[in-house]
Image (tube, rainbow, N blue to C red):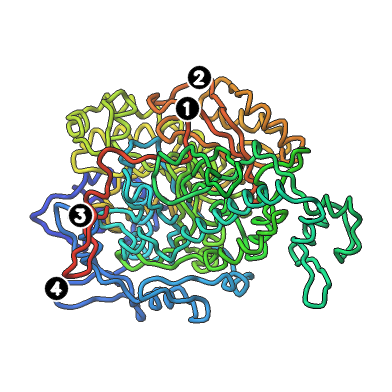
Amino acid sequence: MGLLQFETYIHRNWSQFDPNRPPAFPVTTSLSVYCSLPTERRNQPLPRNKRVYQSNKKKKTMSSSPSKTLRKLEVVSPVPADIDIANSVEPSHISQIAEDLNLKPAHYDLYGKYKAKVLLSVVDELQGSSDGYYVVVGGITPTPLGEGKSTTTVGLCQALGAFLDKKVVTCLRQPSQGPTFGIKGGAAGGGYSQVIPMDEFNLHMTGDIHAITAANNLLAAAIDTRIFHESSQSDKALFNRLCPPNKEGKRKFSDIMFRRLKKLGITKTTPEDLTPEEAKRFARLDIDPESITWRRVMDVNDRFLRKISIGEGPDEKGMVRETGFDISVASEIMAVLALTTSLSDMRERLGKMVVGNSRAGEPVTADDLGVGGALTVLMKDAINPTLMQTLEGTPVLVHAGPFANIAHGNSSVVADKIALKLVGPGGFVVTEAGFGADIGTEKFMNIKCRYSGLTPQCAIIVATIRALKMHGGGPDVVAGKPLDRAYTTENVALVEAGCINLARHVANTKAYGVNVVVAVNMFSTDTEAELNAVRDAALAAGAFDAVVCTHHAHGGKGAVDLGLAVQRACENVNQPLKFLYPLDIGIKDKIEAIAKSYGASGVEYSELAEKQIEMYTKQGFSGLPICMAKTQYSFSHNAASKGAPSGFMLPIRDVRASIGAGFIYPLVGTMSTMPGLPTRPCFYEIDLDTATGKVIGLS
C-alpha cells in the first residue's frame, strides 16, 4: 500500500483503527474521490472533524466550540437490531439540536424532550439569507425489502455533519403505520444510520398523519351529508337553513360563503338581496354521486375497505352509494401539505380541492361545501415540520408522507426551504424521494421543484447488489422468506446483467441537469468484484461518481466517501434544471412523456380515463403536472417485469385530479391506493417491555 492509499485508509477508518483488524471494505473502492482532488489538496490531509472522536479516556476536540450534540457511536459487529441500537443511544434534548441550527426558542414549539415543531416564521426571518446545496436521494427499482434509501440519506448526513464538519439538515418523510405494521417496517433508517427516538419517529410522531386523516374524513362526511340534505329539501328551505336568521331576525353570509358567491359571479353581500334563481344556484350544489372522487382514508393497510357501500342505515333514506378507503398518506391533503409554501397558501389549496362534479359538469370544491376553513384549522399545526436528530446528533426535519407509488412521495417544500436557509452557503440539505427514481425522483423534479422553485445540484441513486442481481434474472425476493443463495454468493455476471436497471435510472436522472452520484449500499455478503462491476456500470452510464458505502454497519464513518463525492458533485454542477415535459402541452402528452421515460412504446387509455381527461381539460385543469400512480417494483406496470423493460404499452385505467395539491393523478394498471397486509405482518414482532416501557421488535 502506497503513502496515498495508506493516508486515505487511515482517514476512512481512523476513529476505530485497529492494525490487527482488516478493513471493512476494499480500500480501492474509496480512492476515486480523493484522487480526483486538485494536486494542492491531495498533498494535504483530508478534512477530519475530531469533534466526534472520543478515546476511552478523554474527548479530543478540534473546534474551540464543539457541538453539544455530535456524538461518537460505539459500533459493534454483527449489527444489532435497529430498535436495540436506537434504544442504546440517549438523544440530546431537542433544544440543543435547535441551538446548533441557530434556532431561537421562539422559532419552535416543544413536543416532549426529543421533538419540536419548527414554526414557519423562520422562513420569513431568514428570507434574505442564501441557500445551501440541495441534494435528493432516489434509488434503483427496489426489491420488496427496500434497498436502504432512508438509511443512506441518514448515513450521508451523519458523514457530512459529524465527520466532514459541514452544516447539514436531513429532510425525511413521516412514515405511515401501513408499512410500519405491514411489510417494510418503519422509515427511520437502519443500523447505525437512524433517526432517533426511532419508536417516536415511526409511531404517531407529532400527529400530522392523524390530522390529515381527520381533515380528509371531515370533508368526506360533508359531501355525503350535503347530498342527503339537498335530496329532501326545497330550494327555499335549503337556503334558509344555510343562512339562518340571528336573534334580530337578520340573515348573513358566513365568510366562507363569499368564496362560493364570487365563483358564481354574484356580488351581493346579504342573503335577502339574492333572487330566487341566485339563491338556488348558491345553495344547491347538485353533486352527481357518480362523479365523486373523494374517498375516506385511514392509516392502516386494510384491503377490505378498498371498495365499500355507505348509507346502509335506516336513517339515510336509501342514500346508498359505492365508495372506498385509501391509505391516509395517499390523501390529497397530504399532497397539499407537501407542496404548500405558507399557511395562507395551504388555506387556498385546501379550499380548491375538487371532490366531484355537479350534474351540470361543474367542479365542486371544499369551499363550495363550506369546509375549507375547518380543514385548515385541523391542519394548522401539521404545517410545521418536526425537528428530530440522528444517532450521531445531526438535525433532521420530518414532514409530509411516503408512498411515491400512489402519492407525491416527497418531504415538504416548507421543510426543505427552512433547512436550506438554516444551513446557509456551503451547507447541505439532503432530502429523500420515495421508491425508485422513476417515480420518486421524477415527481420531485417535475412537481415539487416546479412549485418550490428550488433547484437540486446533486441526485443520488441508491443501489444494492441484491436488487441488481434480482434485475439480472435472480430468483424472486420475498419479504419474510430467506434470501436465495444467489444473493449471498458471488455472481458478477448476474450483477452486470442487472445493471441495465441502474443505467436507465442514471440516464433518466442525469437528463434533469443534475450530477448523479451512485451510492452502493454494501451488504456483508457483497464481494469486491461485484462492487467494482456496479461502479464500472454506473460510470459508463454517465454517473458523476459511484461510491461504496457501509453506513448501516459504521454510521457516518461508512459514508464519508459518499459525502466527499456529493460535495464535489454540488460544486461542479454546470447545467440548469430541465423538466421532463412543459406544462402547456395536453394531459395525454405529459402522461406519454413520463411513459417514454419508463421505456414504454405507447399508452393505452381506458374508456373511463378518456372521459376523465376530456372533462379535466374542459374544466381548465390541463396545465397541471402529472403524478403517476404506478407499481414501484418495475419501470413498467407489471411488477414482475424486472431489469429495464421496453416496448410495452402502459395502461391507464383511471385519471383523477388533485386540484388543490396541483396535479393530475393517473392510475396505472391495477395499482391500488389502499395497500394490504401480508400473511405475516411486522406487527408479529412489535411489543412493549412493560418493565422498562421500551418498544421492542420495531424495525
Marks 4 and 1 sit apart, C-alpha to C-alpha, by 55 Å
Which amino acid is tagged 3?
Answer: Ala
Q: For residue 648, which numbered disc appears in the image?
A: 2
The amino acid at mark 1 is: His
Query: Do the numbered discs 3 and 4 sit on residues whose CB atoms are within 8 Å?
Result: no
Residue depicted at x 73% and y 38%? 584
The secondary structure type at the circle numbered 2 is loop
Q: Can residue 3 be seen at all in this image of the molecule?
A: no
Residue 407 visible in the current orientation: yes
Position of 564 with respect to 592 (left or right) is left
Q: Which mark is residue 637?
A: 1
Q: Quadrant of residue 28?
A: top left
Q: Given the image, on which type of amino acid does mark 2 rest?
A: Phe
Query: From mark 2 to mark 1, how far is it between C-alphas?
Result: 9 Å
User: In the figure, residue 340 lies in which quadrant?
Assistant: bottom right
**Residue 56: which disc?**
4
Secondary structure of the residue carrying numbered label 4 = loop
CB under 8 Å between discs 4 and 2: no
Q: Nearer the viewer, residue 129 or 211?
A: 211
